[in-house]
Amino acid sequence: MARPRSILWIDDEIETLDSQVLFLQQQGFAVERAANGDDALALLRRQPYGVVLLDEQMPGTRGLDLVPQLRAIDSSMPVVMITKSEGQDTLRDAIGAETADYLIKPVSPRQVLSVVTRLLEGDRIRQQRLSRDFVGRFRELEGRRGEHLAWREWIELVAELADWEVKLGAADEPGLQEALRTLQSSIRRDFAAFIAANYPRWLAERSADRPPLSVDVVSEFLRPTLDANGKVMLVVVDCLRLDQWAVIRPLVERIFEVEVDHYFSILPTATPYSRNAIFSGLYPAEMAARQPSWWNDSEESSLNAHEAALLTDQLRELIGRDVPVHYEKMFSAADGEAMLKRLPGHLSHGGVTALVFNFIDQLTHGRTENDALFEVARDTPALRALTRTWFERSALLEALKEAERRKVTVILTTDHGSIHCHTPATIHARRDATANLRFKFGEDLRVDDPSAAIVVDDLRAWGLPPRTPSTRLLLATDDCFFVYPTKLREYQARYRGAFLHGGVAPEEVVLPIALLTPRRG
């Protein structure tokens, strides 16, 4: 709620401020004057003011002593301290009292106007500027539809859209948010066509110009850091979208120098495939061939049981010797607390400390089954807010602080993102079809709307282990989720509005990978 365009100016020499008051009134502000604290409190009890300008040095009650009494009447009202003192103690006292700003006499009318405008109209001015910037940029982004974008251009586009999603969500611009959602939907269809045309080629031609994929995370990002420093902490936050990373990045930047790159998840964008590819450096077909006893895709829950061994093997192949690996996977707060007790020991030795955090993935899946979680993570802005709240109090943040204290460089990334799904896509399948909602393996699978899915008949060409000769893979596009004709209403009621993954939306595929360097000194 906007505060009124009114000012309460408290100063024992108030009669000397006529020119200042007149100037503010000419700028459209209503100004009320008070010569002492008692008069000011009486005025404030009668009506609210947008901002208080408070002289610090007055007879009787000091300005700083008056602040708690002002806040008791209007707790959200900004107070600007005006003082003759340039002493550090006064400045610190003003900061400690959470004053909105601090001016040193003599102050010019323009100084006062600048502070008052920022406090009373800053949000509106920033929102207007944001709206103008987005409208201008929207036309350019919309004009890129239909262009044949290279993978680097896709990363730039998807990252920019995620930034706009965060900015418009914070500015509470529903009209512009709807325009952005429409643009995102059309871009998702273009992205699906791009993936269908290029993904098999990326896998077939190892030397081809292609984006970094899940299989490259250790070799391209982690190994150079390990070679340079002798130790590194690898953090994988399961199911972290670009927009979720954007809201926790400012908290990370308080303790690290942050450089961000991006990579593409392999397909399907689901943990058994994408995270195993990170730790092994292998596509699923290669992993199944090399470790057949570890790959039983009829039991997906067990497919990520060997990540520490996979990382150890990959590092041995890359470096030519054994590298110490300390691996921890966190499902709960108790897991995090136990990890933090062991972490100093891990970081004191060389090698790789690998931490996997599953909270975001659990939240994403759990909100579908839990009414309370659904209410607090109803849409993408709410999911971002909950992600930040979790991070602020998480074992992950404490682990990052411990790494910074010990001057250990961190690689922070995720295995896949998620997409807020609203569109059911009817498919027909035999009983052998897998249960996933954004990707399905099965014999003779078909989808009613061809635009709702990429159909993969040659699993090997997509880096996947072979199944029966007639098995195909469906990968959902846009914000679709798969439903059966016989369970149409049940699936729509249960999963419409769910955050899902496994398909080919940019939000699932294009992922952040950040190099966190401890601040020296």
Image (spheres, grey):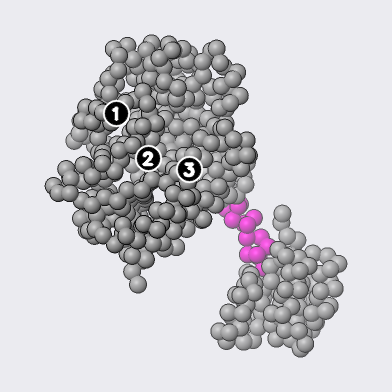
Residue 459 lies in what quarter of the image? top left
Return the residue at label 1: 295
Determine the residue positioned at 80% across, 82% down.
Answer: 35
Question: Decide: marks 1, 3 in contact (CB < 8 A)?
Answer: no
Q: What amino acid is labelled 2 in the image?
A: Asp
* Quarter in which the C terminus is drawn: bottom left
Cα separation, mark 1 vs mark 3, equals: 25 Å
Return the residue at label 3: 360
- Mark 2 is surrounded, within 10 Å at the Cα level, by few (under 14), some (14 to 19) or many (20 or more) other residues, namely many
The first of marks 3 and 2 along the sequence is: 3
Residue 161 in picture, x, y percent from top left: 47, 42
The residue mark sitting in front, 1 or 2, is 1
For the question of whether residue 326 can be seen, the reply is yes
Residue 466 in picture, x, y percent from top left: 27, 20
Return the residue at label 2: 415
Question: Decide: marks 1, 2 in contact (CB < 8 A)?
Answer: no
Range of residues picked out in magenta: 116-129
Q: What amino acid is labelled 1 in the image?
A: Trp
The first of marks 1 and 2 along the sequence is: 1
Within the magenta stretch, is there residue 123? yes
Residue 420's label in the rendered image is none
SS at mark 1?
loop
* Quarter in which the N terminus is drawn: bottom right
Count of picture labels: 3
Residue 172 in picture, x, y percent from top left: 62, 47
Determine the residue positioned at 54% across, 25% down.
Answer: 423
